[in-house]
Image (cartoon, coloured by chain):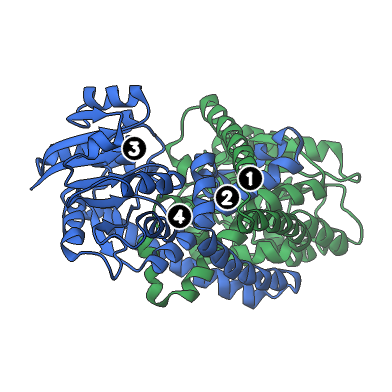
Chain colours: A blue, B green
Amino acid sequence: MIGRLVVVGLGLIGGSFAKGLRESGLCREVVGVDLDPLSRELAVELGVVDRCEADLAAACQGADVIQLAVPILAMEKMLGLLADMDLGHAILTDVGSAKGNVVRAAGQAFGRMPARFVPGHPIAGSEQSGVQASNSALFRRHKVILTPLAETDPSALATVDALWRALGADVEHMQVERHDEVLAATSHLPHLLAFGLVDSLAKRNENLEIFRYAAGGFRDFTRIAGSDPVMWHDIFLANRDAVLRALDSFRGDLDVLRDAVDAGDGPQLLEVFQRAQAAREHFGRILARRARKGTLNANDDHKEARS
Amino acid sequence: MIGRLVVVGLGLIGGSFAKGLRESGLCREVVGVDLDPLSRELAVELGVVDRCEADLAAACQGADVIQLAVPILAMEKMLGLLADMDLGHAILTDVGSAKGNVVRAAGQAFGRMPARFVPGHPIAGSEQSGVQASNSALFRRHKVILTPLAETDPSALATVDALWRALGADVEHMQVERHDEVLAATSHLPHLLAFGLVDSLAKRNENLEIFRYAAGGFRDFTRIAGSDPVMWHDIFLANRDAVLRALDSFRGDLDVLRDAVDAGDGPQLLEVFQRAQAAREHFGRILARRARKGTLNANDDHKEARS
């Protein structure tokens, strides 16, 4: 049981975190902070929070846990503001899709790594956005990765861990670097390839005429190119180094595959495709197992935009 | 109304073509040819064809239309066998996913481009395969591209066109080169990237552990990496030149995108992502329009493997 939870940023992720914990009864009070007056009003109306504040300092007064759910490029500014306040014993955590840059920003803002800062990232999202899309079940059976540092207070880590578990999330702890590498490979790189391919075709084909011949395979492959351009631009700036490493590894492998096509090297192509098919089937089994674990959530088919 | 239709190769595509036309009543007789005795037996049992022959020459005796629905790398051999027969007035057509190599093979086999050969490609498929998956509605509202040559007899073209339309397909005529370029861009390149990315991650991560962190976006992006490795190996060998051109264009654009990430060039990234998002939304509207045109087919969500 904690006293006051403050959620800064009432978008889909912040709103869902607030609403779920409010419904859990684990927090005496859930306070929302957002720059947008309409979001603050809706958050109260929809039962996402108990009350809202426009002012960060006023909201954080007496907070036990402060969850930063602002866009990843706004984290630095937010951490700078928090570093100037007396946060008492408050635990600080965040939901940024890249962890290295948030951790660096925290160290710089506070002059050292704050012991009560627990970096985190829920691998969940939805095609919907905004506080009105808040869903207390959004994180159920989804992975949440926490990346504690050597300086992190174990009791702060345990508290943040418990809050996510109360929402039904599958929490794992991981090194910052490993998190950024894993997300670069499984989420950021696929988004870059999908955005890149769609733009590459669009600019070479007048009136987008080529898309008339695309079918189901292309639809699935490029679905993530429909994601929010601003959010993804933020993520690529935030996770630059890990994305470049993942991209360069892939480009090396793609060059080898290109040479195999060029040389008409059937056995080499078959080997790559067979290994890929086997790995994709393994991944399909992971997804099926995860779906079996809980009630099937029809909405899961659309949870991707932010992952 | 035509007399005898012969379908060579009773897989999903050949079987669905045969079954649909048999049900349409447009052909007096539908004859199947397949090397596999079980497929021949099932084809008759399931009402896919009126009768089967193991021997190509026996089946083609008195044929009005011969549809070649064998794997693309088997087309050359099949065309060679047909060139040695007296086909009378029979129209020859095929369903190969690349057209340049089939057209070249036909020219070589017959010593010149046969006037009654109509190259074709239905952009349809399913995750299921084999004659037991034959579905007379498989091509409904799907594009079928015919690529007639200067030598092609207009009445042969009109007959093949009418057969596909009888199955509810949306038939278009296109140059061979344009077909191969369009398919390389919208189907073959995405498959190469999906197979390539999954294999690249799989071989760098022990026990495929990284896939545990992948979410919905990755699932959709890599779905086509679950496609049949042998069929796709055939397609890359058959459409090599067009695939290399599409891949090299994309690699050039990807290099520019890489530089933008490296330089932290936010405006450039945002521009690409916004253009891609707009193009993807345009494509989404095409798909929605296509779905509205006819009865919604629940199965359409899985039509991809062969497209």
Gap between marks 4 and 2, in whole Å?
Answer: 11 Å
- Pinpoint the chain carrying mark 4: B
Q: Which mark is residue A130?
A: none
Disc 1 vs disc 2: Cβ atoms closer than 8 Å?
yes
Gap between marks 3 and 1, in whole Å?
Answer: 31 Å
Q: Which mark is residue B218?
A: 4
- The amino acid at mark 3 is Gly
* Residue linked to disc 2: A194
Question: Looking at the image, is mark 3 or mark 1 earlier in the sequence?
Answer: 3
Residue at (75% x, 74% y) in the render: A263
Dot 4: within a 10 Å radius of its alpha carbon, few (fewer than 14), some, or many (20 or more) residues? many
Dot 3: within a 10 Å radius of its alpha carbon, few (fewer than 14), some, or many (20 or more) residues? many
Where residue A187 appears, x then y in whole percent? 46, 55
- The amino acid at mark 1 is Val
Can residue B271 be seen in this snapshot?
Answer: yes
* Residue linked to disc 1: A198
Can marks 3 and 2 be said to lie on one chain?
Answer: yes
Disc 3 vs disc 4: Cβ atoms closer than 8 Å?
no
Where residue B224 appears, x then y in whole percent? 52, 56
Q: Which mark is residue A9?
A: 3
- Pinpoint the chain carrying mark 2: A
Gap between marks 3 and 4, in whole Å?
Answer: 26 Å
Where residue A231 appears, x then y in whole percent? 48, 42
Residue at (79% x, 39% y) in the render: B157
- The amino acid at mark 2 is Ala
